[in-house]
């Protein structure tokens, strides 16, 4: 009895095998990060993702002034941003569904020193798959999403992830 192979399933098998072989060298590409251009809350700077790709690792922290876990991790995120700033990592806090006044109050009360932008209508957040705050996305130098961290523990997991990315062979470029 010979096995019956459908034409469509054969193509799918060949495609799957090609993908496995292509990824066999260990170079697994993550999904490309959606591009963005945001004005910081203080209006002093426009952050364009196209200027960062190939130069920096980017940590996007989606948060809100009304989010208790975000407030609880604000000091740790400040320390992380300061620790990695000179090593080629940019941290950007993006306040979602917030007013400028509420975001400014959060920045003042938590002494936030890294750039902060607004996304009041979730335009960018939805493109990155936001399902609630806090939500942290890490983008490597190639512009690929390498991590999506939901919830409070993101700040405690970030140093290990960033150290790994910075130790990667392409990190020597900066």
Image: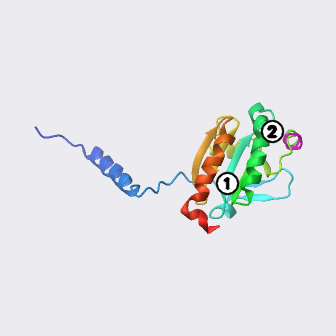
**Tag 1, which secondary structure?**
strand
Query: Residue 160: x percent and y percent?
Result: 61, 47
- Asked whether the residues under the numbered discs 2 and 1 touch, taking CB atoms below 8 Å apart as contact, a structural biologist would say no
Q: Position of residue 42 (x, y in %)?
A: 87, 52
Query: Is 71 placed above or below 53 here?
Result: above
Viewer-side residue, 163 vs 103: 163
Q: Nearer the viewer, residue 117 or 136?
A: 136
Does residue 139 appear in this view? no
* Distance between the alpha carbons at the discs numbered 2 and 1: 22 Å
Viewer-closest of 22 and 100: 22
Q: Is residue 139 left or right of residue 2?
A: right
Can you identify the residue that label 1 sits on? 58
Q: Is residue 156 visible?
A: yes
Vertical side of 118 occupied by 43: above or below: below
Residue 5 lies, in percent from the top left, at: 21, 43
Specify few, some or many for label 2: CA neighbours under 10 Å numbering under 14, 14-19, or 20 or more.
Answer: some
**Image point 68% across, 50% down: which residue?**
59
Q: Which residues are magenta?
A: 103-109
Q: Earlier in the sequence, mark 2 or mark 1?
A: 1
Relative to 36, does residue 51 appear above or below in the rendering? Answer: below
Report crowding for label 1: few under 14, some 14 to 19, many 20 or more residues within 10 A (C-alpha): many
Quadrant (top left/top right/bottom left/bottom right) for the N terminus: top left
Secondary structure character of the magenta stretch overall: helix
Q: Residue at x 64, y 35 (%)?
A: 131
Q: List the residue tagged with mark 2.
A: 98
On the image, which quarter does residue 68 sit in? Answer: top right
- Helix, strand or loop under label 2: loop
Rendered residue at 69%/60% (across/down)? 87
């Amino acid at each position: 009895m010979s096995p019956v192979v459908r034409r469509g399933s054969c193509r799918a098998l060949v495609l799957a095998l090609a993908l496995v072989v292509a990824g066999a060298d260990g170079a697994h590409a993550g999904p490309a990060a959606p591009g963005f251009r945001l004005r910081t809350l203080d209006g002093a700077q426009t952050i364009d993702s196209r200027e960062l790709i190939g130069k920096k690792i980017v940590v996007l922290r989606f948060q809100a002034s009304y989010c208790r876990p975000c407030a609880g991790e604000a000091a740790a995120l400040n320390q992380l941003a300061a620790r990695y700033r000179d090593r080629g990592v940019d941290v950007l806090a993006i306040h979602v569904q917030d007013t400028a006044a509420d975001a400014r109050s959060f920045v003042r009360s938590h002494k936030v020193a890294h750039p902060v932008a607004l996304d009041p209508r979730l335009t960018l957040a939805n493109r990155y798959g936001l399902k609630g705050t806090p939500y942290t996305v890490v983008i490597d130098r190639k512009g690929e999403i390498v991590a999506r961290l939901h919830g409070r523990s993101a700040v405690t997991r970030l140093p290990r992830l960033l150290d790994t990315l910075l130790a990667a062979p392409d990190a020597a470029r900066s």
